[in-house]
Every structure is written in C-alpha cells, then in structure tokens.
Image: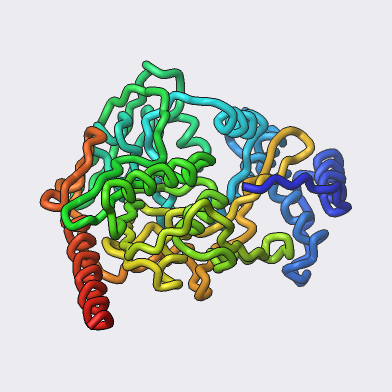
Amino acid sequence: MRTFRPSRMRLAATALALTAVWARSAPVSVRPAETNASPDDPYANIARLAEVLLHVRRHYVDGARTSYADLIRGALRGVMSSLDEYSEFLTPEEFRAMQEDTEGEFGGVGLVVGLREGALVVISPIDGTPGAKAGLRGGDRLVEINGQSTEDMTLAEAVRLMRGPPGTTVRIKVLKAGRTDPIELVLQRAVIEVDSVEQTRVLEGGIGYVRITQFDARTAQMLDRALSRLEREGARALILDVRNNPGGLLESAVDVCSRFLPRGRMVLITQGRDERQRQTFLTRSAPKVYTWPMSVLINEGSASASEVVAGCLQDHRRAVLIGERSFGKGSVQSLLPLTDGSALRLTTARYYTPNRRMIHELGIEPDILVPWNPRQLARETASAPSPAEDPQISAAATTLQGVLKYGEAAARKDAG
C-alpha cells in the first residue's frame, strides 16, 4: 500500500470558503445552484453540495446529528463508497488504528474479509485461528458484528469491531452458503501469528507439497528452506497450495515467482491514471530457480498476491492451475493523509497478469476445474490433508505424476 501526501489545492480551499459563506449568510430558502453547469464544473457542483448541507442543517428533524463535521464526514464516506468497495474515508481515529495494526501484533479472530456486491463476506479464514476453528469458510456472509448490522458497513469498521484484546469475545451472525437463516457465533479473540509457509512434505511418487498461507516479508526465505528440504527428501515435482491465501505483500509475490522463473520475466503490471502507478514487476535473482513440474492450487479464498502468483505462473506456462476460480481482488489502494489527521484509502491502480488479463472482479480461472467441498477441506487444526482426503491435491498429484512419466519416457527414447 503506497502513501502519498497531497499538496494543498486551490479547489479544496475554495470548497471550504464556499461552505463557510453559505453557512453564515444563506437564507432558509436557498437559491439553487446552476442547473445547466457542466458536470465537471467544480464551483457549481460544490455550491450544490453547500446547498444540500444547509438544507439538512436547518430542516432535518434530529438537530443533534447535523453538525457540519458530521455532515461533511458523511458526505466524504458517501463519495468514497460510490467509487468501489475498497475505497473509503478514514477518520483520524480509524487512520491511527490502521497504522497501529501494521506496526505490532493484535488480537482478532483470524478472518480476512472483503466486500462482494455490497455484502461483507469472508475471503478466507486463517488456519488455526478462532474463525477457522468455528468452521467459517470463504464466501460466508457476515450479517452482524456485536449486534451491529453490516449493511453499509465499511471494511475498516468491520475490522475494528472484530479486533480487540486477546481473550475478549466478539459475537457475529453468519449466513452460510445454501442457508436462509444466519447462525450466531461467539469467538474468543487471540493473537494472530501465522507461519506463511507450512505443511512441507513429499507425497507418493516424489511429488513435493508446500502451502503458502500469506505473503509477508519472510515468505520467500521460508519457501527457500521448504524447497531445499523437499529436494533433500527426493521431490521431483511440486504442488504449491495458495488456497484460502488472502494475499499480502506484492514484493513477496514477486520473490516467490522468482523461485520458479528465470530473472527478468514479467510477473505483473499495475496500471492507473497516475504515471507512478504504471509499473512492470519482473522476477529477480534468487538463491536457486527450481525447474520442477508444478501445479498451483487455488480457490475462491485465493486473493490479491495469491492471484498474482497463480496468474504469472499460468501465463508463462510454468504451472498447471487446479481448483476453482480465485476471489478477484486485483487492485492497489493508496493512503492519502489529509491535513486534519484523517485519510483517504483510494483505489489508484489495478493488477494485470503478464498476458494483460485483469484480475480484479474476474479472478484467475484454473486450467483444471475441481469442485471444492468445504467438508473435505475443513481445517480445524494445522494438520495437512492427504490426497485421499483432498480431491484437489489428488488431482494435482495425478497430473504431475503423468508429467513425470511422460518426461521419463521421452528421456528413454532420446537415450535409445
């Protein structure tokens, strides 16, 4: 997430001055703003906003809710929510809380949430956390948090309500897929600490398996150790599991791709209106580039950086993607601090795969579709599922065993 500090703009000063003038001097019967003004005329449209504020201030039945600070804050939230589900206005308190969350550990329930068609949904639970142990799954809809309806609730507010001191509880109502009545759950908050690379092992036939749960600053180094271990144990192919991985650091996704592609290959493109948001990310030098046949597992809980990795390896024909279509969160949010300590979280760019496929709202389609049965993939503990228990791992192992057999047959033919 990038942070920019905007300079003072003449338009902002004009807006404040206009509002102040209207507040002091406009009569109860307000002269309407110019109706034939251009949609992009800032002065006429700001005058219309001031007109609305004055009418609400003077005539709304509940005068306690009509301070100009409250009205402007509501207007700003409305502006941001009208753009997309990830753009939002943050009060000074919300902005400080966001900064604190990125600087230390916190208590929570281990749910990564997002907005889909205006509804607050679980993108994925984090393994071993209260949310995962309660049986929550990607796609579950959060209806209430601590008695508050999530309708029109921002992501920042939802996260704030679910986080708190470890040991305290949060009450949620969840609408599960295929059900018409929500269920109520009481979850006890815990410190959320997750190893980003886990469950490393070698399956039958020399098929290595490793799972990435999120992309953080340590992921690439942890993956190096996992791959080295798999190599020592005789792995000849690899299943890379990014199911229910909500993403994380974009730089970490680039580093992961660099373990499987030569240096200088395109990983993704970010494109926005600002030239600074138009960037091409390439693979970098890595301690070792692994050339094993690969399969990547994805599902609807795979989002953001997970989709970057899956899309990159698919476009370069470096891996076979197996599972279900990913979540479709492929946009960049920049933090724009404001002078009063508040901030805007604004979508400024979108992700595109090396073949120029847009990820946002579309997701990444697998090469081999294998339906996901939540009961088969339930993970109340960190234990690793076997191919017999997990149809997607089974499909990946079968695919890679076929690739290995084909390679062995081709090698024998060349030798003979």
Q: Residue at x 44, y 41 (%)?
A: 222
Residue 369, position as x, y percentages in the image: 24, 67
82 is higher (above) or lower (below) than 99: below
Residue 349, position as x, y percentages in the image: 61, 61
Residue 119, position as x, y percentages in the image: 39, 50
Q: Residue at x 20, y 47 (%)?
A: 377
Residue 165 in view, yes or no: yes
373 is higher (above) or lower (below) than 103: below
Q: Quadrant of the C terminus?
A: bottom left
Q: Quadrant of residue 311?
A: bottom left
Classify residue 131 as left or right of residue 22.
Answer: left
What's the colour scheme? rainbow
Residue found at the very far front of the displayed protein: 416
Q: Residue at x 62, y 43 (%)?
A: 89
Residue found at the very far left of the displayed protein: 388
Q: Quadrant of residue 22?
A: top right
Count of numbered labels shown in the rendering: 0
Nearer-the-camera pick, 72 or 309: 309
Residue 159, position as x, y percentages in the image: 47, 35
Residue 66 in view, yes or no: no
Classify residue 13 as left or right of residue 277.
Answer: right
Nearer-the-camera pick, 332 or 11: 332
Classify residue 88 as left or right of residue 166.
Answer: right
Nearer-the-camera pick, 138 or 221: 221
Classify residue 321 as left or right of residue 6.
Answer: left
Residue found at the very far top of the displayed protein: 167
Q: Residue at x 52, y 49 (%)?
A: 252
